Amino acid sequence: MTDITYTYTATERRDSQGAVFGKGDAANVKAVSVTVELASAAQNSTTFIKRIPSNARILGLSTVYFDDLASSGTPTMDIGLGSVDSNITSDPDALNDGINISSAAGSASLIKDIANYGKKAWEFVSGQTTDPSGSLDIYISIVDAASNATGTVTVELFYTTD
């Protein structure tokens, strides 16, 4: 039998490229589920979700779930990363933007572009070129119009630190 000739090589997003983890060391995935009840929120309102390490690699399994949050108008939800102790310039749509929350209950990936799955949190922040160390806040914003219905938003966050 001959070896496979690979056409492409995948990009592994870990500090130790090609490392093979032993039993019990499978990247140590952290899982967090956060639920908030949003009242009829005004436009540009923000809601804190979770504080994570700036070097957390956010996995593609991370998802936001939401109720229909408007009976009229077209509000959207953005998911951003916020400064902790002035370590970055907060980026209100770093992870995802323009999520339609006005037509029906639904869900969306926490990260908009699948090419960015597995990047470190600080790499999503616009203009950030180095790890600021410390922590970053994940938060959601209601933008483009006011939501006018009360509903639930749940974020399931999966990340690793390596």
Image: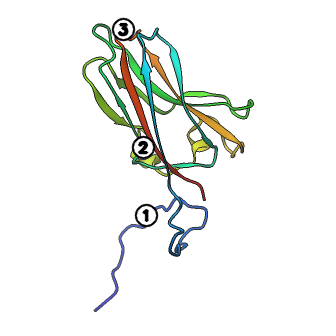
Instruction: Please give the label number shown on residue 10.
Output: 1
Where, by quadrant of the figure, is residue 75 drawn?
top left
Q: Closer to the N terminus: mark 3 or mark 1? A: 1
Residue at position x 63%, y 35% from top?
127
Residue type at mark 1: give it.
Ala
Snapshot quadrant of residue 37: top left
Query: Does label 2 or label 1 sit earlier along the sequence?
Result: 1
Mark 3 residue type: Asn
Query: Residue at the spot x=35%, y=70% of the render?
Result: 7
Left or right of residue 135, residue 155 in this image = left
Query: Residue flagged by tag 2: what amino acid is it?
Result: Ser
Q: CA distance from mark 2 to mark 3?
A: 26 Å
Indicate the quadrant containing the C terminus: top left, top right, bottom left or bottom right.
bottom right
Name which residue lies at 63% across and 37% down: 136
Which label sits in the foreground, 2 or 1? 2
Q: Nearer the viewer, mark 3 or mark 1?
A: 3
For disc 1, the neighbor class at 10 Å (few under 14, some 14 to 19, many from 20) is few
102 shown above or below 84: above
Where is residue 146 drawn, in percent x and y?
Answer: 41, 9
> Which structural element holds mark 2?
loop
Q: Which mark is residue 120?
A: none
Q: Give the spatial CA distance, label 2 vs label 1.
A: 21 Å
